[in-house]
Image (spheres, rainbow, N blue to C red):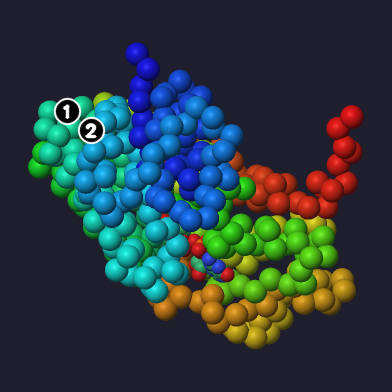
Amino acid sequence: MTKRALITGVTGQDGAYLAENLLEKGYEVHGLRPYSAVPDEGRIEKLEELKLHYGDMIDGGNILRLIDAIQPDEIYNMAAMSHVHVSFDVPEATANINALGVLRVLEALRMMGSKGKDIKFYQASSSEMYGRSPAPQNEKTKFEPCSPYGTAKLFAYWTTRNYREAYGLYAANGILFNHESPLRGEEFVTRKITKAICEIEAGLKQKISLGNLDSKRDWGHASDYMEGVWQILQAPEADDYVLATGEAHSVREFVEVAFSHIGINLAWEGENINEVGRNKITGETLVEIDQAFFRPNEVHHLLGDASKAHNKLGWKPKYSFEGLVEDMMRADRIIDKQSKPRAA
Ligand code: GDD
């Protein structure tokens, strides 16, 4: 029998990779996207079999009606206001979507009674929930969120666990550390860096402005993580799992490795807000610091321990840190694409 999946937030990076993955596995895939006045289908336009619906995490009736009409076997909640820095500007909207939105889906499943119990639910929880808790972090680590995004995600995490315990729903959390790809939004630091460097190489830009260069993240590839997300919902019992690579790198290291792809080595000079990254050979300033990209409260060091997912699900990421940067740089390169011979 064909399995049916419903993915919220299907137009985002994770939604797009997951939809592609599930279609390849033979699923019937339905995707929810909020109404947008500007085109938002770029990441999913090649997925012709994907069935799209308008849906919004702040509209409980809409969510209930859609779940009842689609009757999915599995729901993957990938919808979120996903930018940590922006969440400081719109904390109430962030909580409405990221916290109450999850409650609305779980309430819909609860209201559906025995039909709701047949539907497996995945919640996209985040390593941002660990906040200031010392690294490495795993499923037993204390949560200390330090952003409106993190606190909203923590509400959703506990609500998912409580609905599993209180009502016997199959509801699982994936606590995912940062995961990137060529489909990553340009407002996140990795894609901002790879895109800017490729523009610098093509002569379209002179330098890149960044915030905190010393924060460390455990960066993996979104395609590896979406396979893990699917595996989480295939476990016989619903449970919570960390997905991470077990390796952390600073923003500074990411910048250095990405620049090395266009043959540039950087030399750092100065301190704090006055620090700059120069081309070691020419002395040209290529990286500068801008206070605007610092957050009111920062998570300094995220490093995940995914041994539970490895031992219980057999999940292991394929991409290394270097492989991830290479994949993103390859996709953003303008020069290479321009010099490619035209198809005959
Ligand atoms: N966005 C951004 N822009 N971040 C910068 C910049 C900049 O110019 N300069 C330095 N950073 C630093 C941030 O301060 C942060 O420490 C780090 O780079 C990563 O920032 P993001 O790429 O915006 O990701 P994030 O770690 O805040 O959040 C991502 O990962 C979470 C999982 O831990 C998002 O994908 C979240 O949705 C996700 O839950």
Residue 267 drawn above or below residue 160 = below
Q: Quadrant of the N terminus?
A: top left
Residue at 41% from the left image edge and 51% from the top image edge: 35
Residue receiving disc 2:
68
| Residue type highlighted by circle 2 | Asp
In front: label 1 or label 2? 2
SS state under label 1: helix
Residue toward you, 187 or 139: 187
What residue sits right under mark 1 in the picture? 115
Residue at screen point 32% across, 36% down: 75
Q: Is residue 158 left or right of residue 192?
A: left
Marks 1 and 2: CB-CB under 8 Å?
yes
Percent x, y of residue 302: 44, 60
Q: Is residue 296 left or right of residue 140?
A: right
Position of residue 279 relative to residue 343, above or below, is: below
Above or below residue 174? Residue 286 is below
Amino acid found under the numbered disc labelled 1: Lys
